[in-house]
Image (tube, rainbow, N blue to C red):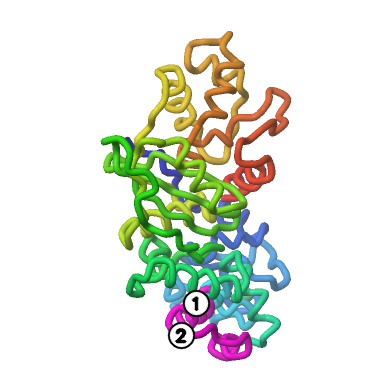
Amino acid sequence: MKATAPTPPVFHSDEARWDAVVRRDRAADGQFYYSVRTTGVYCRPSCASRRARRENVAFHTTQAAAEKAGFRPCRRCKPEQPSLDEQYAARIAKACRLIETSESAPSLATLAKAAGLSAYHFHRVFKAVTGVTPKAYASAHRTERTQTGLARRGSVTDAIYEAGFNSNAPFYSKADALLGMKPGEFRAGGKNAVIRFAVAQCSLGALLVAATDKGVCSILLGDDPEALVRDLQDRFERAQLIGGDAQFEQMVAKVVGFVEAPSIGLDLPLDIRGTAFQQRVWQALRKIPAGSTVSYADMAKRIGAPKAVRAVAQACAANAIAIAIPCHRVVRTDGNLSGYRWGIERKRTLLEREKAA
Ligand SMILES: [Zn+2]
């Protein structure tokens, strides 16, 4: 079973491209460039310089094409260099590696120097990119290392890069700090499924991903990583829970990447467990495209049970696979967000992000 994957933003027409330029849409950066006849320069769509008149603007799919047409790179948005987001992501990834490879936590000054930023600026950018402070990142790493006693493995930063962020794609990740959970058998009772899991930190807080050999069976969101693990234990009381390995962390990185940038899409096999009615509702949820919402009443109609609005709402609330089964896309008939088992603020953030994508 595959979750539906929204397509990345595509700019098919000059009208759509111009619209992106007018909105200074950062998601359009890298997709195309625009040149201005009167100044002789070309820019990224998000360039902050004064808006050119439409009749002087032409679009180019690559930098090379813009230069071939006789335009030079704008000095403000520097379209010939990696975007600011990409530069920051690379600098912060460097600092993360330094933390990961150091025996004792490097000082803020050391990290800032390695990243080529002032201490103040570094701290701010680090938090914006990873979702946690450098100190929290370092202590999470230490905890993980002592808890597991495992040899250091590929960092989550690597996994996020491998999961689909490359230098050409806008780098949105606000999360690459994996908070290590102790691998081990929490409950050996029963001969049921083996469930692998890992907890990561993302811009929505803590995120737990668990999977059987068939696919993802839980994606949980919350403030407290330990509470999420307890929740997982309660849901799968008789399963054998074990910590995820490096390969598993890549899957977690995929989910985190999707949370941060819904336009990337999420293509993961799911292992959906529930009553027949719940399954009908959840399958219908997966058909709601990213960026749109439906009401509970609509959902009831869609599954052919128009009177079962309450039961539909209950099934939405019972969904254990946040995001991949997008119960956050169901709202009240009046457009109010209504409830979300992982917090109304998270629902709001997810919907805003999908709209903007
Ligand atoms: Zn520019």
Q: Quadrant of residue 250?
A: bottom left
Range shown magenta: 89-116
How many marks the image carries: the answer is 2
| Distance from Cα at disc 2 to Cα at disc 1 | 13 Å
Q: Is residue 93 left or right of residue 159?
A: right
Kindly identify the residue that appears in the image at 45 percent across and 59 percent down: 181
Front residue (pair 343, 171): 343
Q: For the residue labelled by badge 1, is the local secondary structure a helix, a strand or a loop?
A: helix
Q: Is residue 108 magenta?
A: yes
Q: Is residue 97 left or right of residue 185?
A: right
Kindly identify the residue that appears in the image at 53 percent across and 77 percent down: 92
**Label 2 near ligand 1 (CB < 8 Å):** no
Q: Give the numbered dot on residue 103.
A: 2
In the rendered structure, which disc, 2 or 1, sits on the residue that comes first in sequence? 1
Instruction: Name above or below for residue 234 compared with residue 87.
Output: above
Q: Are marks 2 and 1 in contact (CB under 8 Å)?
A: no
Q: Position of residue 296 (x, y in %)?
A: 61, 22
Q: Give the numbered dot on residue 96.
A: 1
Instruction: Name above or below for residue 103 compared with residue 314.
Output: below
Q: Main secondary structure of the magenta part?
A: helix
Whether residue 168 is visible here, answered yes or no, is yes
Q: Kindly identify the amino acid type of the residue bearing the numbered disc 2.
A: Glu
Q: Position of residue 341 (x, y in %)?
A: 61, 36
Q: Residues within 10 Å of mark 2 (few under 14, many from 20)?
A: few
Kindly identify the residue that appears in the image at 55 percent across and 86 percent down: 106
Ligand 1 located in image quadrant: bottom right
Front residue (pair 285, 235): 235
Q: Position of residue 136 (x, y in %)?
A: 59, 71
Kindly identify the residue that appears in the image at 70 percent across and 82 percent down: 120
